[in-house]
């Protein structure tokens, strides 16, 4: 019987390795940028076209490569960082496996131009699908210029799984931000389709954070640092008031290498306990300096996971450092007195007459329980139009309607001043529980309605009905401005027409700042910055490839959530009746637009069971 095990050709082996290292265009950007940083460059430029599908170009002014090194760099497991196994536990550089360039060249058309400072001419090298097409001397600047074209051109099955241009470019921006945050000493640029998105000059860490994520963070992040024999922690954490629903501004770096760790993320989030609402995410940029011998960075192909020798101690140190930063800079009340101010107190002679005691005016007829409440003559204060049908809690023969005259019930043991055991009740149809639920009787038992979810369902269906045309917007007398990160600024510009149809009119003021010229009718009470955050959250969800909801539905849902009632609002009987009527006039009254239950019933059998012995 013939042998069946054979060695794979290098071209196929490289394509298999590319499945781990090169998952999308952002992977190419990450690997090439890290190589440029290892080459000790001071300027770095990334040029992308069509979300990286057509072109990814990375240009640096680093040390460059010789003709031999340029050719060897595309061989598998060829590296300048490792000489023996112990070197794996003394790494301070980014790339070390020697798989990245070989994997990229196996699935793309690669052109390399490189020159060292001491060389008169550089080297041009062209490789298509692991096959060397051309290698010759070339006049070029000092440094390295990588052009990666037509990614996955020879693997159509992989290329068709790439996402939209916007989604792929979003991943590229994420990788660019990670490298830029780890290396503020390097000047960096990012250009997409001939439009420059980022220009980051050399700066300090805080200036680099502000340049990437917007001027709003300049006064909203506080320094976090501590030093000990296990780990040195430095960086910045956001104040609780700038926590947002939109995730993505949470970064850990270990020895200037970006790292993902849900375990350490919980250490930071626990430090914010009882300071931010549930589901909100504060920004943080935390840098750990650890002895390389105490970590293992070789546990994942993308090198985004790191194993610590003493992870539990590092967890406690990060938690304590974050709590200290929050307590010192954001939570402890401070008094800022002018040192030049004369704080002398007036002198009062002991023989001076005692002033009259201040008087207090009292209204003996005031009764707080008879204070007038906000009337609700129609449902317009909720943003609810009159429903086509009304809801009756129960049939007349099952549900006792409030009598015209209060009924008198004999309650043994309770007597009034005249020794008459009576109690008056008007049996209201609805009752609000803790401002969160509406309870009402039905034929089969008891029905509970979640107030906020019900209002979201009502507004969602009304907005969707109007979104086919256009939701009216209310012009702002004094338009407010919102400072954004370049990424979010570009995202809003891309979807500006859709937002205008929803009544949210924006105009670009330049420098990553936008003006809010109009707000959707019914949302005048919402802060424009908060509504922008909700819109960005919905737009970011569009990149996940969720086909269950269209982009329009997600944007309309964000509007409905922003305009909906809060749980703490008290409601009178008329308001509760209007809300229930409008809810049961909806197409899907029992479930919210995001799939959460709105109505829950408790049948009589369950109620009887609760009162059994």
Image: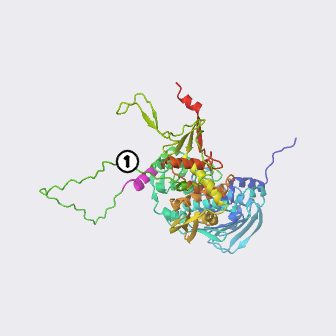
Quadrant in the picture for residue 40: bottom right
- The quarter of the displayed image where residue 110 is located: bottom right
Asked if the magenta segment contains residue 322, the reply would be: yes
Residue at the top extreme? 613
SS at mark 1? Answer: helix
Q: Residues within 10 Å of mark 1 (few under 14, many from 20)?
A: few
Q: Position of residue 95 (x, y in %)?
A: 62, 57
Instruction: Let me know if residue 399 appears in the view.
Output: yes
Q: Nearer the viewer, residue 517 or 178?
A: 517
Most common secondary structure along the magenta stretch: helix
| Image coordinates for residue 285, horizontal then vertical, percent | 51, 56
Residue 235 visible in the current orientation: no
Considering depth in this image, is 8 or 497 the residue closer to the camera?
497
The range drawn in magenta is: 321-333
Between residues 214 and 12, which one lies in front from this camera angle? 214
> With respect to residue 162, does 340 lie above or below?
below
Question: What scheme was used to colour the molecule?
Answer: rainbow
**Relative to 104, is 354 on the left or the right?**
left
- Residue 612, relative to residue 550: is it above or below? above
The quarter of the picture where the N terminus appears is top right
Q: Residue furthest left?
A: 351
Point 62% across, 71% down: residue: 117
Query: Above or below — where is 591 with respect to 172?
Result: above
Residue at (56% x, 37% y) in the render: 399
| Furthest-right residue in this view | 1
Question: Percent x, y for residue 99?
Answer: 69, 56
The count of marks equals: 1
Measured as percent of width and height from the top left, residue 508 is found at 57, 70
Q: Mark 1 sits on what residue?
A: 368
Residue 22 belongs to the span the image colors magenta: no
């Amino acid at each position: 019987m013939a042998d069946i095990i054979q060695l794979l050709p290098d071209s196929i082996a490289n394509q298999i390795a590319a499945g781990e290292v090169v998952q999308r265009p952002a992977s190419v950007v990450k690997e090439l940028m890290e190589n440029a940083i290892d080459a000790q460059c001071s300027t770095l430029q990334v040029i992308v076209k069509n979300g990286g599908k057509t072109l990814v170009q990375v240009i640096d002014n680093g040390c460059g490569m010789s003709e031999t090194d340029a050719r060897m760099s595309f061989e598998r497991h060829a590296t300048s960082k490792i000489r023996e196994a112990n070197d794996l536990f003394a790494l301070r550089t980014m790339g070390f496996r020697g798989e990245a360039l070989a994997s990229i060249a196996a699935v793309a058309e690669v052109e390399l131009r490189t020159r060292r400072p001491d060389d008169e001419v550089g080297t041009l090298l062209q490789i298509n699908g692991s096959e060397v097409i051309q290698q010759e001397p070339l006049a070029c600047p000092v440094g390295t210029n990588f052009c990666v074209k037509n990614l996955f051109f020879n693997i159509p099955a992989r290329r068709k799984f790439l996402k939209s241009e916007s989604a792929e470019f979003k991943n590229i921006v994420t990788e660019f931000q990670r490298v830029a945050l780890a290396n503020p000493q390097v000047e960096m640029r990012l250009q997409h389709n001939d439009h420059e998105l980022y220009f980051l000059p050399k700066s300090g860490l805080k200036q680099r954070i502000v340049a990437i994520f917007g001027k709003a963070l300049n006064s909203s992040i506080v320094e976090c640092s501590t030093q000990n024999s296990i780990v040195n922690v430095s960086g910045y954490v956001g104040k609780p008031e700038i926590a947002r629903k939109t995730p993505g501004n949470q970064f850990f770096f270990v020895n200037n290498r970006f790292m993902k760790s849900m375990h350490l993320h919980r250490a930071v989030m626990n430090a914010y306990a009882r300071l931010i609402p549930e589901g909100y995410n504060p920004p943080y940029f935390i840098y750990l300096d650890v002895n390389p011998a105490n970590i293992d960075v070789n546990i994942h192909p993308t090198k985004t996971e790191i194993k610590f020798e003493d992870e539990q101690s590092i967890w406690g140190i990060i938690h304590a450092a974050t709590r200290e930063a929050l307590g010192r800079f954001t939570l402890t009340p401070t008094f800022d007195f002018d040192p030049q101010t004369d704080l002398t107190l007036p002198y009062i002679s002991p023989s001076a007459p005692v002033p009259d005691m201040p008087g207090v005016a009292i209204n003996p007829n005031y009764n707080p329980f008879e204070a007038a409440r906000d009337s609700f003559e129609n449902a317009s204060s909720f943003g609810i139009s009159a429903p086509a049908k009304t809801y009756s809690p129960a049939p007349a023969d099952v549900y006792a309607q409030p009598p015209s005259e209060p009924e008198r019930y004999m309650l043994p043991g309770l007597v009034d001043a005249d020794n008459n055991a009576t109690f008056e009740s008007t049996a209201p149809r609805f009752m609000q529980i803790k401002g969160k639920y509406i309870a009402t009787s039905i034929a089969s038992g008891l029905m509970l309605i979640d107030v906020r979810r019900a209002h979201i369902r009502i507004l969602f269906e009304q907005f969707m009905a109007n979104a086919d045309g256009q939701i009216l917007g209310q012009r702002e007398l004094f338009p407010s401005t919102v400072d954004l990160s370049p990424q979010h600024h570009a995202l809003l510009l891309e979807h500006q027409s859709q937002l205008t149809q929803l009544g949210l009119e924006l105009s670009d003021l330049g420098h990553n700042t936008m003006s809010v010229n109009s707000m959707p009718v019914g949302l005048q009470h919402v802060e424009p910055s908060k509504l922008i955050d909700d819109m960005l959250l919905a737009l970011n969800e569009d990149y996940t490839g969720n086909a269950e909801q269209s982009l329009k539905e997600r944007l309309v849902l964000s509007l409905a959530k922003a305009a909906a009632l809060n749980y703490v609002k008290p409601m009178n009987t008329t308001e509760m009746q209007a809300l229930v009527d409008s809810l049961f006039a909806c197409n899907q009254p029992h479930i919210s637009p995001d799939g959460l239950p709105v109505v829950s019933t408790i049948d009589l059998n369950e109620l009887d069971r609760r009162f059994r012995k």
